[in-house]
Image: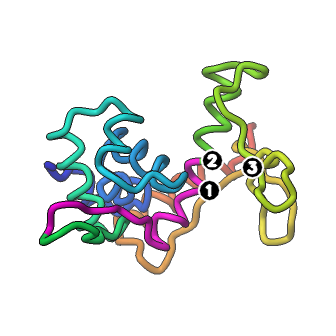
Amino acid sequence: MREPSFSRLNCSIARSLAVLGDAWSLLILRDALAGVRTFEGFTSGLGIARNTLTDRLRHLVEEGMLTQMDVGKRGTRFEYVPTVKAKELQVALMAIMQWGDRWVSGRGNEPAVAFDRVSESAVAPLVLRSTSGRTVSSDELMYKPGRGATPVTRDYLTAKNKRLTRKPV
């Protein structure tokens, strides 16, 4: 799979998208996290072309999102198991699902509803919270340079934050 040019941007979202690849990769990870393990399981559930699936599975294994386990004789059958790295993506996938339930499918038309296996309760809507526990809206977010920020990123965020904190005259 071709690496997108934005993989070199000083941005965790851009770099994450380069690791994930494309929409097929997200759907493969969704299914793997739900228990699909085999090539045939992915093709039947997704209707994805075999060559595309082969490419995406190879990429996800190379990126450490899936582990390929040989369960056949001499490399004739494999299973794909999500790694911890993939499992930690579940929160982001749930956020996309909840957004889609609201803005694409429409409330009351959800294709699937996520439940906690232990309590059998529906998963609550995800919200952003500060470390103090306060809910933070999109309009209340700001970004400060982190340790991995380049000088260009630092300058960009500093200028952006100055515009955000200016009070109208």
- Looking at the image, residue 146 sits to the left or right of residue 41; the answer is right
Q: Is residue 9 magenta?
A: no
- Looking at the image, residue 51 sits to the left or right of residue 136; the answer is left
Q: Are marks 2 and 3 in contact (CB under 8 Å)?
A: yes
Snapshot colouring: rainbow
Q: Which mark is residue 126?
A: 3
Residue type, numbered disc 1: Val
The magenta-colored residue range is 75-93
Secondary structure under badge 3? loop
Q: Are marks 1 and 3 in contact (CB under 8 Å)?
A: yes
Q: Which mark is residue 81?
A: none
Q: x, y (%) of residue 23?
A: 37, 39
Q: Are marks 2 and 1 in contact (CB under 8 Å)?
A: yes
The mark closer to the camera, 2 or 3, is: 2
Q: x, y (%) of residue 111?
A: 64, 26
- Looking at the image, residue 98 sits to the left or right of residue 132; the answer is left
Q: Label 3: few (<14), some or many (≥20) within 10 Å? A: few
